[in-house]
Amino acid sequence: MSTDNTESKCGASTGESSTETETAESKCGASEARSASNASGEAASATKTETSSESKCGASSSSSSSSSKCGASSDDDEQEVGSTVEDFDGDPGRLVAVGLGPGEAEGMTTRAKTALAEVEQIVGYTTYVDLLPDDITDDAEDIYSTPMCGEVSRTEEAIDRALAGNDVAIIGSGDPNVYALAGLALEILESKGGTASMVDFEVVPGVPAAQSCAARVGAPLVNDTVSISLSDHLTDMPTIESRLHATAKEGFTIAIYNPWSRKRRENFEKCCEILLEHRDADTPVGVVHGAGRDDEQVEITTLGDLPELGETDLIDMTTTLLVGNEETYVWDDRMVTPRGYETKYDY
Amino acid sequence: MSTDNTESKCGASTGESSTETETAESKCGASEARSASNASGEAASATKTETSSESKCGASSSSSSSSSKCGASSDDDEQEVGSTVEDFDGDPGRLVAVGLGPGEAEGMTTRAKTALAEVEQIVGYTTYVDLLPDDITDDAEDIYSTPMCGEVSRTEEAIDRALAGNDVAIIGSGDPNVYALAGLALEILESKGGTASMVDFEVVPGVPAAQSCAARVGAPLVNDTVSISLSDHLTDMPTIESRLHATAKEGFTIAIYNPWSRKRRENFEKCCEILLEHRDADTPVGVVHGAGRDDEQVEITTLGDLPELGETDLIDMTTTLLVGNEETYVWDDRMVTPRGYETKYDY
């Protein structure tokens, strides 16, 4: 199935999930971390009301320092959360976690656009800040963005700005509940002695990558479905393998996030092995790479041919895999997973 | 957690999934089927260009007849698909399956609104047609809606109208890939001797119920997650039970669709038993009933207290359950499922 820009709706979500997991693996070494700090500084100096927002925000320094550590995957190299609620005077503002959906303006919900228009400040990964419509970025009092790095520091920055009295949105593509920052925001709020109510914490849902990518290949996920990330940064590989075995056995369609990176190609290879233990080699697999980006590619392949794609440009951290179940078939360049109506109706 | 209309964003999706599965169980007996036929007729007579669209559409009669049978769950009571591609002259129009998301206008993506504005005709379940913004329904040349009944006939109606030369959208809340009609549309197209390319079949994704409901209770689904429907209309109960066992064992957070109906209360009871075999009684469970509707209720309970809620108004076919994993906790009226950052970072 060739790329069709009129259907390019799902890549950035995958990108965000890669942000979540790639962070401590390959993209954020010390040099990258320095550029992260610089980028933060540039973003800061570029903002309209930087002085006031800086003066309101106790976390900008800890943001840089934690960025400078986010290349670490070892437990002894930790990000420190700096300020607590006691460091802020006055009434807190609001904090809303907004899912941008597929990562393009047309994929955003009206509610997400309204939420972003209502806040004073927007915090997010540079790639997704760049995806925002001009009318939203032009109206924002302040925008704080960091490169693919430091999701913890970025989330703390958003929280500190809210605790300092600003209405703040922290953005990500896809949905804030899918391998994203909604939970981290609540965990850090708690660690600071704050509460969700204190900042009227709200989550604005978006279209997840699995759904955006599924739409591009037809109807692969219309029955019971599981989403599994192959990144072992926050979940150990034995757990991931066990989940793959358990669900491949049970006829779930499987959406696989973060399938491949240079640092852990063996996770992808192991995943293919496990799936092939339980499903036929001709099981259809939808592969959506960098959708919504210049290098977008969409292909429908088979489980048997999947392993050899691991070393190609088609599969990396910006790719989402949609693995069919035993009933899934390919028809007219679409993946179709029957829901079972054919057992009830004659058509 | 009390109902807050400013957060009412997820019920209709659940409703749509209930539409998909409730059909052949309790809502569509013979008398309901008659009213379905009547309702179809009323919808028809209410449309602006009914004559022209009827004359273009070979399926309106089969629509009624199949509606009159959709109460059946036994295999010998089948819906017949009437027309085939040979019955239509001229060039086919376009067919797009549009996910409305949470089911309220603010939850729709810009892309969904654009798609609906571009088509000539809209086909859908009456409840979701009623949710469409006036500017979209006012602009539509024809709107065909049926009550909670006959998803097969409704889908065929949309396909026949497209094959007859109309640009048609078939709508549902949530996402067309989540217990919805994207797959059925392709299956029926194939059965008619048509192709997806013939009608430029496209799927426009929307925010699924799981994400919309998760947003209302915080961050319950930020790790590997599975969605399972308890309706045994299209999937047999042994399969559903096996899937519950397999995933409850593996630390997935679980979104449960269609948890309860009068006709199969034992499915819910069995589900609770299975979950309690593998998870502690104090495991948090988010319960979102009829969200976005007048009778919306949102509660966070525990797995131990869940069974007794089965007979209350809180849990029915319009409810989505969000079952936490071993790490999920409740804080400040929110469900939080840690992603594992706490093992990497100090906050």
Image: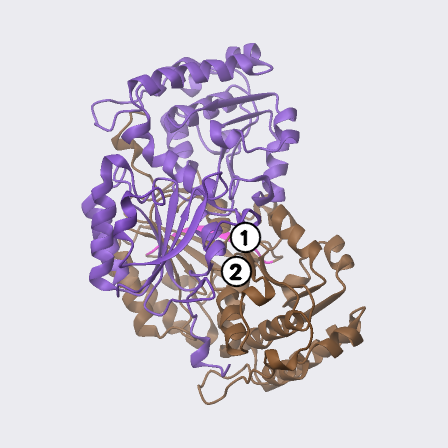
Chain colours: A brown, B purple
B270 is within the stretch colored magenta: no
Residue B167 seen in render: yes
Q: Position of residue B130 (x, y in %)?
A: 54, 29
Q: Callout 1: few (<14), some (14-19), or many (20+) C-alpha neighbours within 10 Å?
A: many
- Badge number at residue A206: 1
Amino acid beneath label 2: Pro
Residue B210 in the image, given as x and y percentages of width and height: 43, 51
* Residue A299 covered by magenta stretch: yes
Quadrant location of the N terminus of chain B? bottom left
Circle 2 marks a residue in which chain? A
Above or below, A194 against B262 in this view is: below
B318 over A101 or under it: above or below: above
Q: Secondary structure at mark 1?
A: loop
Q: Chain of mark 1?
A: A
Question: Is residue B144 rendered to the left or right of residue A166?
Answer: left
In the foreground, A202 or A126: A202
- What is the C-alpha distance between the residues marked 1 and 2? 7 Å
Q: Which residues are magenta?
A: A295-303
From this view, report whether residue A126 is shown above or below residue A208: below
> In the rendering, at what x and y percent does residue A220 appear?
40, 46
Disc 1 to disc 2: CB gap under 8 Å: yes
Residue found 48% across the figure and 27% down from its top: B126
User: Percent x, y for residue B58?
Assistant: 45, 14
Amino acid residing under circle 1: Gly
Corner quadrant of residue A333: top left
* Main secondary structure along the magenta-highlighted residues: strand
User: Which circle marks residue B134 in the picture?
Assistant: none
Residue assigned mark 2: A176
Give A83 or A337, whichever is nearer the viewer: A83
* Secondary structure found at label 2: loop
